[in-house]
Amino acid sequence: MVTLKATGIVVEYNPFHNGHLHHVQEAKKRTGADVMIAVMSGNFLQRGEPAFVDKWTRAQMALQSGVDLVFELPYRFATANAPVFAKGAIEILDAAHCHAYCFGSEDGTIQPFLESMELIDQHRVSYEAAVKEAMSCGMSYPKALNEAYKHILEDAQKTDPPVDLTKPNNILGYHYMEAAKEIRSSMTPVTIPRIVAQYHDDAVAGNAIASATGIRKTFFTSGALEEVSGFLPEASERLLHKWQQEREAFGSWEYFYPSLRLIIIREGASRLTSIAEIVEGMENSIYKAALSNQTFSGFMEQVKSKRYTWTRIQRMITHILTGFTTSMREEIPHASYLRLLGMTANGRDYLNRTKKELKLPLVSKAASFKDPSLTADIRASDIYALAMTQDKGSATLGTDYLNRPHIL
């Protein structure tokens, strides 16, 4: 039997846009892949945000735009910091028997990443000590990592870093490679440069490519999908219009805040201490802010601090909304299954050929598999559905049981 080569990509598709289409096409071309496999975050994302539209809709966008298989990145990893996010994603791609994985980066070439990994390995003890020292001084985790990186560059007498680890995609790329090394994966790392729009850039009229952040910002400002249609493949535009016709609202913290606020006030500060990532008295700040702010922006302005990034705080409140506790998180050290959200005919052929080589169980029916990580995913999906329809009273719960993988 002829072996099909699969390339993996780690995605959120919030929503799937022309830049993502470029990534899929370039990754396939540069790696000679027969099959493109995406591991995609579910209904809550790495920056601690609810997804613009749900995972089933985003999976369809991907399948109609060149991806052959979409596996869900479990909630435990999808809403974690960069090292844990990368670890879960790489474990899934490795288990899916990918021969390569490809990520977008600001640097755009793989050699600087390899050099940085080697440099950090050579100074591992001083690097980790510098991270701990920076965090003990009140520095956020991302800034502490960068300070430690600068520290070992000075030790190595390097004036220019091999790769700039202050850039968001470079940071993720580095952690993908570190995770792959840790599990001794045989996957080949490949990177392509981000083009036109960087991660946080606003959408610019006349460009075909904009960041997902810019697209969402433009939409929420105008309220019109027509304002962002030029940045989207046809499939994404059509599916977003269908979503709007059926639900009207799109996922955002502004829309979800009433549900979050109710939970915070009902629980009280003392009961928030069991929630994942709630540390050092943050439960008191969060509770006080919920009591005194009717808007999400006002709430965040009151809670934000120098010690914790906006993203870290959003992850805290995501866990409050979903009821994800520290003990739940500790139950899930590794990715433990391949949750199939959708596939093309090509993807199905790949699974039929490789099913005996998959390193983790393949889950296509949620009811047939019991696992604490899957339980957290199902709960997050139901919470998302309830928050999305809070003013309609018509939420469909249990979609993870009701929906079968989409087949294109």
Image (cartoon, grey):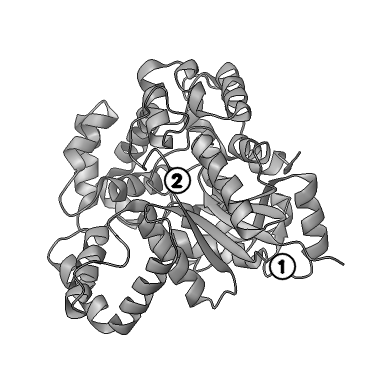
Marked residue nearer the N-terminal end (1 or 2): 2
Residue 57 in the figure: left or right of residue 273: right
Q: Where is residue 401 in the image (x, y as percent from the top left)?
A: 69, 43
Q: Which of 260 and 248 is in front in this view?
A: 248
Q: In this orientation, does residue 240 appear? A: yes
CB of mark 1 within 8 Å of CB of mark 2?
no
Does residue 327 appear in this view?
no
Q: Residues within 10 Å of mark 2 (few under 14, many from 20)?
A: many
Along the line of sight, the residue nearer the viewer: 197 or 292: 197
Image quarter of residue 125: bottom left
* Residue beneath disc 2: 45
Question: Residue 358 — which label?
Answer: 1
* Residue 329 x/y as whole percent: 44, 61
In the picture, the quarter occupied by the N terminus is bottom right
Q: Residue at x 62, y 21 (%)?
A: 242
| Residue type at numbered disc 2 | Leu
Tell me where residue 351 appears, x and y as whole percent: 77, 58
Q: Is residue 112 above or below residue 234?
A: below
Separation of disc 1 and disc 2 at Cα?
26 Å
Q: Where is residue 32 in the image (x, y as percent from the top left)?
A: 67, 58
Residue with the most extreme right position: 1
Q: Residue at coordinates 43% horizontally, 71% vertically from top-left?
A: 178
